[in-house]
Image: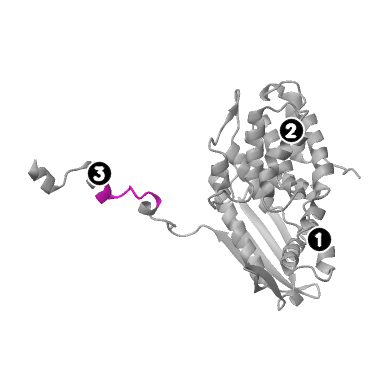
Amino acid sequence: MPENISVSSPLEQLLKKAVRTQGGKFPRRNGTYFDHYTSIKQRLADKYYAVTGAALAQTGDRYTKHDISHVDDVIETAGLMLGFGHDSHNPAYKNLEPYEVFALLLAILLHDAGNAIRRQGHEKKAAEILREVATATGLNDLEHRIISSIAQAHGGEMPDGSKDTITALMKDPEPNIGKIKIHARRLAALVRLADELSENYTRADEVAIEAPGTPDVSLLANYYCLLINPRIDFVGKSVHLAFHVDVKLLPRVFKIPKGDGQTEDIMFIDYIAQRLEKCERERRYCNRFLAGFASFDRIRAKLVIVDNNREIDTVPVDLEEVGYPSLSKTVKELEPNFDACRLRNKHSLTAEQEQGQ
């Protein structure tokens, strides 16, 4: 049965208006980009996102929802990160080129579609899927490469194990299509961080939570979505994450895979702490590309313990860069040739060599 898609988000309506009023700022001036976007979204909803749940369940896990509603959540979050819905005199979305809005939205549509095939390496399917769903749009090869790379960079890792997918996949940070410049790394960071911040109760699979036999790793992910309450503060450059946890969950121990067939025990609050640390790493990483545009300075998290619908304890924590920074690697570790002795031996004569001359 076909999905009923919506294109009513502020970001999507911005694209619709830009196509109508600024057609000359797109590679082709035929005014069809919003229609193409809508048809691609419908195709992805019907063929890919309608079956992601069944595809993911084949591995035995009950993941959080990866249907078209998650895509809409990421679009909404990206809009909030760009300043929609905030009282700001200079929202970031006003600094996007019209075609960048199209590229951003299309990358969000694509980012999780590969889950319909399989979970592992799903991000690498973006280019293949775009080719299939955009055959009638007339997108050229360069557009395909740029947009699919932006989508792919939202997760996974490179062949060498690096998680710095944005830099690796977009060697040119600001490619152009004709006279149109695209801030590709900036858009990729928007997709990646918006995806990270789009966890909410609607993603939780309550059937999986209630069903016997659901793997603990899936239970943890679904509880996390069920109990999180996120808020984006564009003006204050902050992300607020509140977790309302029933006291009955506190002593429960979950077993999660450790590798080599082994498991390890973890409790839910510790799992939240791990997810927050990952979220903070993503914030710092994406800020590298969002600086001066739509960066966020901190994550303000709050743990609220509830007993019989009554708050009995609150634990706040701010995640941000404070104090004097330290380097994870020394200059010589980053570049072995940045070394006095090496450069002396390479380019200068020693005292004995000078005397010999």
Label 1 Cα neighbours within 10 Å, binned few <14 / some 14-19 / many ≥20: many
Residue 77 vs 182, above or below: the answer is below
Residue 205 — which label?
1
**For the residues marked 3 and 1, what is the alpha-carbon distance in whole angstroms?**
63 Å
Q: Which residue is mark 2?
A: 15
For the residue marked with disc 3, what is the amino acid? Lys
Q: Give SS at disc 3.
A: helix
Q: Which mark is residue 346?
A: 3
The secondary structure type at the circle numbered 1 is: loop
Residue type at mark 2 is Leu
In the rendering, at what x and y percent does residue 33 appear? 75, 28
- At x 59% / y 57%, what residue is drawn? 280
Asked whether 102 falls inside the magenta stretch, the response is no
Q: Residue 275 vs residue 39: left or right? A: left
Judge from the rendering whether residue 297 lies leftward or rightward of residue 305; answer left or right: left
Q: Does label 2 or label 3 sit earlier along the sequence?
A: 2
Classify residue 249 by image quadrant: bottom right
From the viewer's side, name the closer residue of 284 and 304: 284
Q: Position of residue 258 (x, y in %)?
A: 63, 68
**Which of the marked residues, 3 or 1, is nearer the chain's N terminus?**
1
| Quadrant in the picture for the C terminus | top left
Give, as a three-letter code, the residue at label 1.
Asp
- The answer to which of 40 and 307 lies nearer the viewer is 40
What's drawn in magenta, residue-wise?
Answer: 334-344
Q: Could you classify mark 3 by the number of other residues whose Cα lies within 10 Å: few (under 14), some (14-19), or many (20 or more)?
A: few
Q: Judge depth for marks 2 and 3 and give the one in front.
A: 3
